[in-house]
Image (cartoon, rainbow, N blue to C red):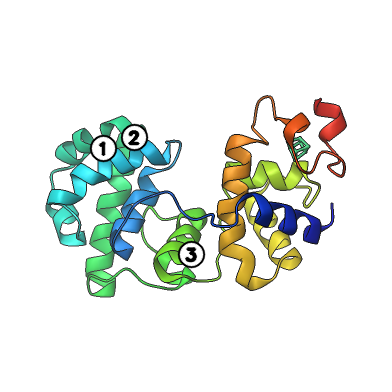
Amino acid sequence: MDSNVVMNGLDVMYQDAECELKSNTPFETLVAVILSAQCTDKRVNMVTQELFKTHNKPEDFASMPIEELEQRIHSCGFYHNKAKSIKSASRDIIDRFGGEVPSNFDDLTSLAGVGRKTANVVLAVAFHGDALAVDTHVLRVSNRLGLVKTENPNVCEDNLKLLFPKEKWSKLHYQMVLFGRYTCKAIKPECENCVFNRECPNSRDLR
Ligand code: SF4
């Protein structure tokens, strides 16, 4: 599909799309994004609302016993790995970046436990950077709309960046996430209610 048609359609549906994770500092954003893997934003917000009351700096998490952290974030799922990532990233931020979350992609991805998707979301949310994070929704929606043809998130990101203007990247991420969450769902996409159902190459197959 034509990328301008997609961009205009998403703008009409989700003009004010933004990150639903709540955070007040780049470090809180980083922790929230790590917790959000395979978890709803709503659940993460419930957990971080309590967690950040007592712990919201790298030093807090670096010195926190991992068992305590696991218990506090338990309901977000995958809590062993997430606790490990939060503690490792915290130590790295203290040791290598003077306690401040770095604001560029290469330094962010150099942090232990921080991958490309996490770095892109942190860049977009905390630093208002021109980043385009590809999660499972963005990957699925991009393929279904015929914008890309790949199951590799990194290739998808590169292709989307060629199709859309830089200033649209971060918003496009949130728009596609919402569109994938509520319309172009993984199972039973709502093609009959979709604004793209005439142009979408996968619409007819899925009806
Ligand atoms: S028509 Fe169906 S498959 Fe295509 S984008 Fe819309 S919901 Fe997704």
* Residue 155 shows in this picture: yes
Q: Secondary structure at mark 3?
A: helix
In this rendering, the answer to whether 206 lies above or below 107 is above
Q: Secondary structure at mark 2?
A: helix
In this rendering, the answer to whether 179 lies above or below 110 is above
Check disc 2 and give the amino acid type. Cys
**Residue 4 lies in what quarter of the image?**
bottom right
Camera-side mark, 1 or 3: 3
Q: Quadrant of ligand 1?
A: top right
- Taking the spot 40% from the left edge, 73% from the top edge, the residue there is 103
Q: Position of residue 163 (x, y in %)?
A: 76, 64
Check disc 3 and give the amino acid type. Ala
Q: Which mark is residue 147?
A: none
C-alpha span from label 2 to label 3: 22 Å
Q: Position of residue 64 (x, y in %)?
A: 13, 48
Asked if the residue at tag 3 contacts the one at tag 1, i.e. Cβ–Cβ closer than 8 Å, the answer is no
C-alpha span from label 2 to label 1: 6 Å
Q: Which mark is residue 124?
A: 3
* Residue 109 shows in this picture: no
Q: Earlier in the sequence, mark 2 or mark 3?
A: 2
Q: Which one is in front, 34 or 51?
A: 51
Camera-side mark, 2 or 3: 3
Q: Which mark is residue 73?
A: 1
* Residue 188 appears left or right of 34: right
Q: Which mark is residue 76?
A: 2
Q: Which one is in front, 161 or 11?
A: 11
Check disc 1 and give the amino acid type. Ile
- Taking the spot 47% from the left edge, 58% from the top edge, the residue there is 121
- Taking the spot 55% from the left edge, 66% from the top edge, the residue there is 131
Query: Callout 1: 10 Å neighbours few (<14), some, many (20+)?
Result: many
Q: Which one is in front, 161 or 175?
A: 175
Asked if the residue at tag 1 contacts the one at tag 2, i.e. Cβ–Cβ closer than 8 Å, the answer is yes
